[in-house]
Structures are given as structure tokens and as C-alpha cells.
């Protein structure tokens, strides 16, 4: 599987949700796309300042609840709370990988993350 390119905008301090529909061309009709059955898959995504950065700015996984998978429809959804996006302070790069039950890993999407800084901040009363 060749990873698609999708450049994301994250608005700092807001709830972030992006869904990716993982599909493949129908062998009978290449004009039609079919959804992958993601039963038994897990997923992971990291945002880093650069590809070579040693630490991740944010890590999202099915294990930490920031990624959910709709098995039958082939949809992987990445979600971050406003608290998580508030802690993002720079733009960067990311990729999203899926792993089947046998340990085979595929990168499904990658790209840049542009941060739109937050102006409004919560002020303690």
C-alpha cells in the first residue's frame, strides 16, 4: 500500500477530529473503490517537528484512545481534545500507520501539520 498525502491544519486549543477511509481498487472494476476490512487492526500516528526529531509532539494510538477504527467500513478516526491541541506549539510532520494481527505494518497517510495558534485562552476567575 502506498501512503496518501494529506496536509492537515490543527487549530490550537480546539477539538480535532479527522477520519481517513482506507480503500483499494476493485479487481473487477478499477473505477470502483472498496473499503478495507480493518478487523483486528490497530493504528498509530505521531506528529514530530521534523522527520528527524527524536521526540514526538503528540502520539495518537488505538491504545491511548486517540484513534478509533470502524472495522467494517475501513475508517480510521484520529481525535484530540482541546487540552491536547493546546499543548501543540509548533507545526510539523506526521504519518498514520495501521498494523494487522500478524504484525504487518502499512503507512496509509502522511503529510505536514500546520498549527493555527490560539488567541483566546481560558482565564481563571
Image (cartoon, rainbow, N blue to C red):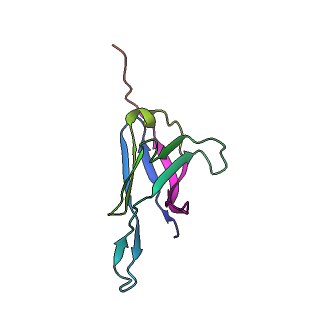
Residue that extends furthest to the top in the rendered view of this protein: 125
Residue occupying the point 39% across, 83% down = 30
Q: Position of residue 88 (x, y in %)?
A: 50, 37
Q: Is residue 46 above or below residue 120?
A: below
The x and y percentages for residue 42 are 46, 54
Q: Decide if residue 67 is on the left or right side of residue 106.
A: left
| Residue located at (38% from left, 52% from top) | 18
Q: Nearer the viewer, residue 94 or 112?
A: 94
Please name whichever residue, 2 or 34, is drawn nearer the observer in this view of the structure.
34
In the rendering, at what x and y percent does residue 28 appear? Answer: 36, 86
Q: Is 101 within the magenta?
A: yes
Relative height, residue 21 to residue 124 (above, below): below
In the displayed structure, does residue 31 sit left or right of residue 108?
left
Which residue sits at x=63%, y=41%?
55
Against 44, is 73 above or below?
below
Magenta part mainly helix, strand or loop? strand
Quarter of the image where the C terminus is located: top left
Residue 110's spot in the image, x, y percent?
52, 58
Looking at this view, name the residue that lies furthest to the front.
Answer: 102
Total residue callouts: 0
The image shows residue 124, relative to residue 100, as above or below, that is above
Question: Residue 116, located in which quarter of the rendered image?
Answer: top left
Give left or right: position of 53 versus 74.
right
Report the magenta residues as a range. Answer: 92-118
Q: Residue at x 53, y 69 (%)?
A: 2
Quadrant hosting residue 90: top right
- Residue 98 falls inside the magenta stretch: yes
Amino acid at each position: 500500500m502506498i501512503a496518501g498525502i494529506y496536509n492537515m491544519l490543527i487549530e490550537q486549543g480546539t477539538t480535532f477530529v479527522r477520519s481517513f477511509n482506507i480503500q483499494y481498487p476493485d479487481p473487477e472494476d478499477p473505477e470502483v473503490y472498496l473499503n478495507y476490512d480493518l478487523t483486528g487492526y490497530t493504528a498509530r500516528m505521531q506528529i514530530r517537528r521534523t522527520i528527524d526529531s527524536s521526540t514526538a509532539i503528540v502520539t495518537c494510538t488505538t491504545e491511548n484512545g486517540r484513534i478509533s477504527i470502524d472495522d467494517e467500513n475501513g475508517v480510521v478516526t484520529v481525535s484530540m481534545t482541546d487540552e491536547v491541541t493546546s499543548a501543540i506549539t509548533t507545526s510539523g510532520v506526521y504519518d498514520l500507520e495501521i498494523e494487522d494481527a500478524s504484525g504487518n505494518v502499512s503507512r496509509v497517510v502522511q503529510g505536514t501539520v500546520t498549527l493555527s495558534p490560539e488567541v483566546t485562552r481560558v482565564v481563571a476567575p
